[in-house]
Amino acid sequence: MRRKVRLLTGATGWRTHDEPDVGLRSIVVSDGPIGVRGQGWDERSTSLALPSPTALAATWDVDLVRRLGVLLAAEARRKGVDVLLAPTLNLHRTPFGGRHFECFSEDPVLTAGIGAAYITGVQSGGVAATAKHYVANDSETERMTLNAEVDERTLHEVYLVPFEAAVRAGVWVVMSAYNGVNGVTMSESPLLDEPLKGTWGFDGLVVSDWGAVRSTAPSARAAQDLAMPGPRSPWNDLAAAVENGEVPESALDLKLERLLRLASRVGALNGSTPVTPQVEAPHDLLREAVAASTVLLRNDGVLPLSPDVKVAVLGPNAATTRIQGGGSAGVYPESVVSFVEGIAEVASVVHAPGVRLQDRPAPLTTANCRHPHHGEPGLLVRLLDVDGAELTTDHRLLGRVLEVPLVDRAHTVELHGELTVDVTGDWTISVAGFGRLTLDVAGVRLIDTDVPLDTDDPAVIHLTPPHRQATAHLEAGTTVDLVARRELREHTGTATVLAADPPRLSDADELSRAIDLARSSDVAVVVVGTTDEIESEGFDRTSLALPGRQDDLVRAIRAVNDRTVVVVNSGGPVELPWRDEVSAVLLTWFPGQEAGHGLADVLFGVREPGGRLPTTWPATGQDVPVSTVQPHHGTLHYSEGLHLGYRAWHRSATPPAYWFGHGLGYTTWSYEDATTTESGIRVRLRNTGNRPGREVVQVYVSRQSTTIDRPSRWLATWTTTTANPGQTTDVDLTIPTRAFQHWTPTGWTTEPGPFTLLIGPSSSNTPLTIQTTPTPTPTTDPEPAHRGPI
């Protein structure tokens, strides 16, 4: 009995237990979704970094996403990983969600199609994908405990749709969420049994989010299979719960059967050898993905650029491009091509940030810090006992040290480095962590304080502990000894940060320098974006405005250069109050490590901007029709029901800035005709521009006369096509039966009568329509939930 129980809880934070008697080795898991970090956090273990999931959805390209999934599988095998904890299939219920860069879109159908392609690609390489977080885990405020109150129809027609598609795609793992749904926490929820393991027939493993199993018997009686992390867990007491009759032993046997099935699939059983996929030219694939996901919102003809121009590349995110969001999904990229670097490979470039963002302190790096003993780039990390005696040493590359392997008698983490000072002035030196913190600069103690643990959120404890800072006047050309220490206390993790920020120009001087560069350049490319304090795991957004004086920067640059292109480097919507004043607006999302190369390809016309919006962008945050992320007395009411995203905007008196599905290319299209076929519809388009191009043809369904509450339109399917200048192209689309159905207490059914198909390039621009009357279907319709071109 106890050997069975042992296998149902993690051996560590990233491994399951082995059991040699049955040929079972440990199964290794890793966070995703933009890369495979591996076991834990160590900057010396780098990863290929993909564009963010929102960017992947912006491609509307299931084949590209599948190929990126294969790349992730190859990365997983390179790092000895069996299970990738991705993709995230939760929805952009509101743009105020803080973690939406890790989710695909606001629409269940687009999320389902892109998510299924991601899963197919990963698992084709013998690595398990994980559909998470099941279910209604769509905001971060009180994320560990909130109860999502969702009516049954909305749950089935919206929030469960991507997970059903994942099961149809053959996903091997599903992760139960922290939150509850309709009064029951998800690790104990009957939704794990029905519809997941029941109607849908999911035969894989249900793993908990890390720490989401909070009970012994109730969660063990549910269809929860594996409690992570380990080795401590409420399931450590499962043997006693079985012995006293609270949990039947047969429930444990079913869980073990699923664990062993997963082990067999990933090559962890009976000495089997895992599949190792091969991916040619991975950097080229990542570069392709940046261009394919970039959305051109506006273009007055300035784009594409010619290579002989002088370009002022401005903005705080231009040289320090934000390639990923904050939180547990983070990786250490093997390399990063910034926007400045990518453009500089093609054209003559000058650069200035223009404004400063109030971001977290910058941890020491190999560029500005040396090991105090041998002078190599990096810093010394030591574990000390209570008397200050050295227990272990390590040479690390960054001053952000999130995990330190603990040993007996460990009492203090110490970070020690020699800072190379390149600017004379008042530097800001910072230390971060929980417990007692000290900071010594050149032998002088500047910080000695105690930081109490005031949260149970693992994203804060292990990734973003609070900072304390001091100011020191330093002289250029010198090296300064920095020593930071933090006490280790129970439940506070080991994350410790040592940071140093140089003095900055005044705001006025910073802006003036950028204006001068823009005035003397042929084109100004202004990169604006968000920070980790705005888009990250662990909290939601309170505003959609760009931080700092970035709006002022854009307008100041536009005033001196009428060829101003703005590049938006964010994971989700931000306000763009100057959008109609500049020559062009491009969205790059968080584009991964090939950011600069991919943007340069788009700016100079090597590749078309292939992206289309996966989420609606409002003009202002005040206009957003679904904006609530704050639970009331622990419950977050999904009172909007089916009407989220563009569906809600179509009921709103105020239009958004840019509709779901919108995106321009470097050519134009005419939608000429739509006809019915035996299997669906055929649409004829013409490329009316002077360049070859790619178009995303979107089909929405509406119902004019209805007896039930419905959105005014909802996405049914989509496809893509290409054509040369002047060429026509015909595309065939199958309209899934599920597109006409709605959920009732007895299952899926179709309301009798006609529906209208709306066809066009976005949710608001549908120039072609077709009337159709679907054949009524039984409520046991087994059709997959995804409706994209898988």
Image (tube, rainbow, N blue to C red):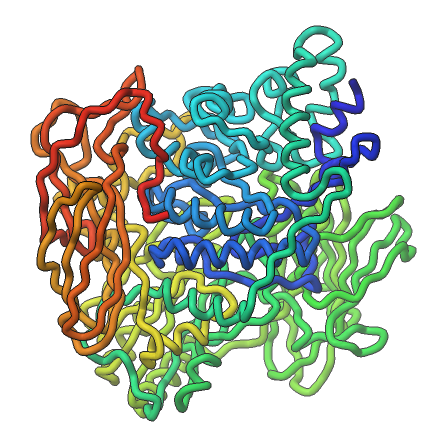
Which image quadrant for residue 93?
top left
Q: Between residue 596 and residue 657, name the one nearer to us.
A: 596
Residue sitting at 41 percent across and 33 percent down? 164
Vertical relation: 750 (above or below) 569: above
Residue 726 coordinates in the image, percent (x, y): 14, 73
Residue 590 seen in render? yes
Count of marks overlaid on the render: 0
Does residue 116 appear left or right of residue 490 in this picture? left
Residue sitting nearer the eye, 369 or 327: 327
Kindly give the residue lying farthest to the top in the view shown.
245
Image spot of residue 744 (x, y percent):
27, 19
Q: Residue visible at 63% across and 83% down?
A: 422
Q: From the viewer's perspective, is 422 left or right of 108?
A: right
Q: Position of residue 347 (x, y in %)?
A: 39, 89
Asked if 478 appears above or below 406 in the picture, the reply is below
Report if residue 634 is visible in the image.
Answer: no
Task: Answer with left or right where residue 503 lies relative to residue 296.
Answer: right
Residue placed most toward the observer, 184 or 220: 220
In the image, what residue occupies the spot 65% across and 72% down?
A: 472
User: Image quadrant of residue 279?
Assistant: bottom right
Residue 216 coordinates in the image, percent (x, y): 66, 19
Residue 606 vs residue 406, the one in the foreground: 606
Residue 538 in the figure: left or right of residue 631: right
Quadrant assignment for the N terminus: top right
Q: Is residue 125 above or below residue 441?
A: above
